[in-house]
Image: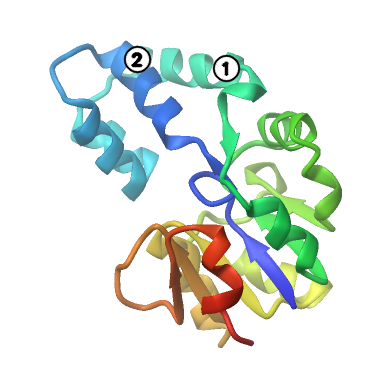
Amino acid sequence: MNILWDFDGTICDTYPVYTQLLKQVIGNKFSEQDIYRQLKISESTALATFQVNHEQIRRYHQLVRTCPADAFKPFPFIEKVLAAANKNVIMTHKSHDSLIPILKHYRLDTYFSEFVTRDNGFPRKPDPASYIYLDEHHGFDLAVGDRTLDIIPAKKLGKKTCLFQNHQTGADFYIDSYDEFFDCVHL
């Protein structure tokens, strides 16, 4: 099985860190729960919802860029799933320079054949262009993500999809932990 992965909230549990960093920038006006919930929709949604100004956005992005790789923890059992796949690829809105240090820190980089990041110039998800590219170059059977926008492009290509820790309608499979992966995902 060849798998296309999202990164944030799918391979590594990054949203708690992002939530704390954004709260640090915008102050105590909003709860961590509210910030987390908006970030899980998208960063742009959170920034608009909380009316984050340009200087605050710059500060938030600087905090994210300078956050150490070990602050972002891989989800339990993810390495077992990565090791079992025939091929893994990543499509993320993260920059290449912020993605690779995290993967290398946890020695997960070797499980991936290719990393498509915002630096590759593809339109943002849910536009399917990056997924088309990855399918043409690697062929993938399943797309795994934590948000609906991660699976929409795969659905457009007729691929199977799995939502992680998200039960919104539209996916073929749903898992809350990677120890459930092989019991739930059947290709």
Residue located at (30% from left, 36% from top): 36
Q: Regarding mark 1 in the picture, which secondary structure is present there?
A: loop
Residue located at (32% from left, 49% from top): 41
Where residue 73 sits in the image (x, y, percent)?
58, 34
- How many marks do you count on the picture? 2
Q: Nearer the viewer, residue 144 or 78?
A: 78
Above or below — where is 39 with respect to 148? above
Q: Nearer the viewer, residue 1 or 24?
A: 1
Q: Is residue 50 left or right of residue 155?
A: left
Q: Regarding mark 2 in the picture, which secondary structure is present there?
A: helix
> Would you name the residue on which mark 1 appears?
67
In the picture as drawn, the residue positioned furthest to the left comes out as: 29
Crowd around label 1: few <14 · some 14–19 · many ≥20 (10 Å)? some
Q: Is residue 98 left or right of residue 155?
A: right
Above or below — where is 78 with respect to 107? below
Where residue 111 sits in the image (x, y, percent)?
82, 53
Which disc is residue 77 wearing? Answer: none
Q: Nearer the viewer, residue 182 or 108?
A: 182
Above or below — where is 113 with respect to 9? below
Nearer mark to the viewer, of 2 and 1: 1
Crowd around label 2: few <14 · some 14–19 · many ≥20 (10 Å)? some
> Would you name the residue on which mark 2 appears?
56
Tag 1 or tag 2, which sits nearer the N-term?
Answer: 2
Locate residue 30: give its quadrant.
top left
What is the CA distance from the residue labelled 2 to the residue labelled 1? 16 Å
Q: The disc labelled 2 sits on which kind of residue?
A: Gln
Residue located at (50% from left, 59% from top): 125
Q: Are marks 2 and 1 in contact (CB under 8 Å)?
A: no
Q: Is residue 49 left or right of residue 135?
A: left
Q: The disc labelled 1 sits on which kind of residue?
A: Cys
Where residue 43 sits in the image (x, y, percent)?
38, 39
Q: Quadrant of the C terminus?
A: bottom right
